[in-house]
Image: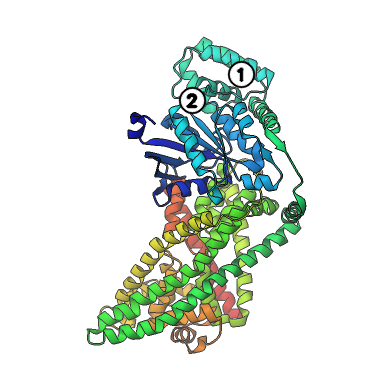
């Protein structure tokens, strides 16, 4: 590599369809030297990082996973704008070697651009198990781009990939390839090319613009209209109108070309064997319209049970460590003024203890979700539940963010990006916060176990039944009054099953847990200190405190739900973070005994909770009807402030954000009111 190239930091764009191993390659190349944010002015995550290879510095940008550059979605728009306007030195196109025809479609679109391209055939081990042997030399000659075989999950092929990237960065980009395999479209392409030949098209290539005009791309038409005279524009429109269904013809021709290239590049295909037959047999059951739902429910039950198996040992360690820690702190601060000891023993430590309890459970949930997604099963949930989602005006892709909300509502809101239709995306965005997150379930389980014991499953059944009614009613209201319009069906790809990549899974889990620690632990500690301070002032008597005055001010509202001021304050604290409600309950009812009591419940279920200080205080202070009202009001309350902020980030609309917040607040009050009065009749 010459001196000029060495002094300049080369930019690599990593492109590819979902489930081709982009994240694995990106994480292995960049390691800890990666940065995550949002694309300028967009809500889609941007991942970039740097690394050094053979004395040269590289910057790599992981483009959003996309099937094409047609700009039907935000991800497609971002990917194609970056490729055309940022002019990366090399574009690495990741392809799944086991599904080569599908994976090469994006390459066909990128070859319309004047850029240096390297094709990375990933998952070659999966292709070999399927009996597929790919002649990479023939494939490279047909596509006129370097081709590298690799198995990213095992670290195989990275040196070859980097050598190909370095060579491509020094080489002149190959001439753009239209991939047109349709006589009518090819004739139109030639005529359009002559019409645009003398125009300044930068940063777009002539080939890209001509093909996109045939496809009916709106951005291409807008750009071209500014470049052409009225007479030239009429000629162009006449040419385009001679091709009915231009986008379908181009896509069909592109797939036809890819199919011929792939067929000529496969040396041989052997049967998959018994393992392949078993895999196909399982997939038939997993995607069956009836049995698939039972398979999905069974897998989800096992998944949450596995999450608890991961969480319980961690909770047990914390449970054993907290009592001696609290006793030690009491002894340590005994000589100091009373308020200092109370600050740590009654305020800070209980709050942090609660956060650690929730962290253990959330870690288990994200681990299970990461495995399900990595092996290729999570996408099948969208397919299986598509018919059920249709009944509430959505399609299967909306099921994905709803499922993600069980882990965290923030993830559910951001997951709405996978929904193509704007109407359905906004409907889904409103609905995901109705789904209870893991932190919310922790609080509900704690309160329900105290007051309803073995009858808790009935309470959970009632909560889920009301949630389904709430989801259906919310969708109907939105579609009737606010989000009228055509609702599209489900079009999506089911990725192949493959072995889990533990490096990728751990990277996903670690990023999610790290985000929770930054947000929740800090927030919970601050809320615990704030609640302690307000409950301690002015004279150390909680009943005379500032917090009591604030809570009693709202008695006219909270009393309709049967909530005393302490429960109302705990309900309000959920706006900051759902898990913060437990720390508030620990401070207001249990003080220093609160954390030990909560861990006992999480780890040992109902056993021994009668002796716990917090549990006894709650049981003696709150009626079952009020407890039921709190559970329902809490279950349907406004999501945490982080979720509200994410709603604004996704919609860029203060009106939508405030409207959603008001809707959730009203839902919470109605649920608490009805539950309280139902409880009065039952208990």
Q: How many marks?
A: 2
Q: Residues within 10 Å of mark 2 (few under 14, many from 20)?
A: some
Q: Which residue is mark 2?
A: 173
**Residue 272 as seen in the image, left or right of residue 505:** right
| 351 lies above or below 472 | below
| 101 lies above or below 335 | above
**Residue farthest to the bottom?**
611
Q: Is residue 632 visible?
A: yes
Q: Position of residue 542 (x, y in %)?
A: 33, 81
Q: Identify the residue shown where x is 51% and y is 88%.
A: 610
Q: Which residue is mark 1?
A: 240
| 399 lies above or below 246 | below
Badge 1 or badge 2: first in the primary sequence: 2
Q: Position of residue 414 (x, y in %)?
A: 50, 51
Residue 307 location, quadrant = bottom right
Q: Is residue 672 visible?
A: no
Q: Secondary structure at mark 2?
A: loop
Q: Secondary structure at mark 1?
A: helix
Q: Residues within 10 Å of mark 1 (few under 14, many from 20)?
A: many
**Residue 205 as seen in the image, left or right of residue 67:** left
**Residue 176 as seen in the image, left or right of residue 53:** right
Q: Position of residue 606 (x, y in %)?
A: 56, 83
Q: Position of residue 317 (x, y in %)?
A: 46, 78
Locate the C terminus by quadrant.
bottom right
Q: Nearer the viewer, residue 197 or 383?
A: 197
């Amino acid at each position: 590599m010459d001196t000029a190239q060495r002094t300049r930091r080369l930019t690599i764009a990593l492109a590819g369809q979902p489930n081709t191993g982009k994240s694995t390659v990106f994480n292995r190349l960049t390691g800890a030297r990666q940065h995550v944010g949002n694309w300028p002015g967009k809500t889609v995550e941007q991942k970039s990082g740097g690394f050094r290879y053979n004395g040269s510095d590289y910057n790599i940008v992981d483009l959003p996973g996309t099937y094409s550059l047609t700009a039907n979605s935000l991800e497609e728009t971002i990917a194609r704008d970056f490729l055309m306007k940022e002019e990366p030195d090399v574009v690495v196109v990741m392809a799944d070697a086991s599904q080569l025809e599908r994976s090469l479609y994006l390459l066909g679109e990128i070859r319309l651009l004047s850029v240096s391209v390297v094709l990375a055939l990933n998952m070659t081990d999966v292709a070999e198990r399927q009996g597929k042997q790919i002649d990479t030399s023939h494939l490279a000659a047909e596509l006129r781009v370097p081709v590298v075989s690799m198995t990213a999950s095992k670290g195989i092929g990275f040196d070859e990939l980097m050598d190909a990237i370095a060579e491509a960065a020094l080489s002149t980009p190959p001439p753009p390839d239209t991939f047109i395999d349709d006589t009518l479209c090819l004739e139109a392409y030639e005529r359009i090319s002559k019409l645009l030949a003398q125009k300044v098209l930068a940063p777009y290539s002539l080939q890209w613009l001509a093909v996109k005009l045939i496809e009916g791309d709106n951005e291409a038409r807008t750009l071209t209209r500014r470049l052409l005279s009225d007479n030239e524009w009429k000629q162009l429109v006449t040419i385009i109108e001679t091709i009915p269904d231009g986008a379908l013809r181009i896509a069909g021709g592109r797939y036809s070309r890819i199919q011929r290239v792939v067929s000529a590049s496969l040396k041989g295909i052997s049967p998959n064997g018994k393992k392949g037959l078993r895999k196909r047999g399982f997939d038939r059951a997993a995607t069956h319209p009836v049995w698939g739902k039972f398979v999905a429910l069974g897998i989800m039950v096992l998944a949450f049970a596995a999450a608890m198996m991961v969480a319980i040992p961690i909770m047990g360690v914390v449970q054993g460590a907290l009592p001696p820690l609290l006793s030690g702190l009491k002894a340590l601060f005994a000589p100091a003024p009373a308020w200092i000891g109370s600050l740590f023993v009654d305020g800070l430590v209980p709050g942090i203890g609660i956060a650690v309890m929730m962290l253990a459970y959330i870690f288990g949930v994200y681990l299970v979700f990461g495995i399900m997604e990595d092996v290729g099963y999570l996408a099948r949930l969208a397919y299986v539940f598509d018919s059920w989602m249709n009944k509430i005006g959505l399609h299967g892709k909306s099921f994905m963010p709803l499922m993600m909300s069980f882990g965290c509502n923030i993830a559910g809101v951001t997951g709405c990006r996978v929904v193509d239709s704007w109407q359905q995306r906004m409907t889904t965005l409103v609905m995901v916060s109705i789904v209870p997150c893991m932190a919310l379930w922790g609080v509900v389980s704690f309160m329900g176990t105290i007051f309803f014991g073995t009858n808790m499953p009935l309470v959970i059944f009632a909560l889920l039944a009301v949630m389904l009614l709430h989801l259906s009613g919310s969708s109907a209201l939105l579609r009737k009054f606010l989000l009228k319009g055509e609702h599209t069906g489900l079009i999506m790809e089911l990725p192949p099953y493959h072995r889990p990549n533990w490096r990728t899974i751990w990277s996903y889990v670690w990023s999610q847990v790290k985000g929770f620690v930054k947000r929740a632990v800090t927030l919970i500690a601050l809320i615990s200190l704030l609640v302690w301070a307000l409950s301690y002032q002015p004279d150390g008597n909680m009943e005379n405190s500032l917090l009591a005055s604030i809570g009693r001010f709202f008695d006219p509202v909270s009393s309709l739900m049967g909530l005393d001021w302490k429960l109302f304050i705990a309900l309000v604290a959920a706006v900051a973070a759902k898990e913060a409600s437990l720390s508030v309950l620990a401070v207001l009812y249990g003080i220093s005994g609160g954390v030990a009591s909560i861990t006992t419940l999480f780890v040992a279920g109902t056993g021994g909770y009668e002796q716990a200080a917090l549990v006894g205080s709650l049981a003696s202070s709150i009626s079952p009807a009020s407890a039921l009202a709190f559970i329902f009001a809490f279950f349907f309350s406004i999501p945490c402030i982080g979720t509200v902020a994410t709603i604004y980030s996704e919609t860029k609309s203060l009106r939508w954000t405030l409207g959603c917040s008001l809707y959730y607040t009203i839902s919470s009050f109605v649920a608490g009111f009805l539950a309280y009065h139902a409880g009065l009749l039952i208990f």
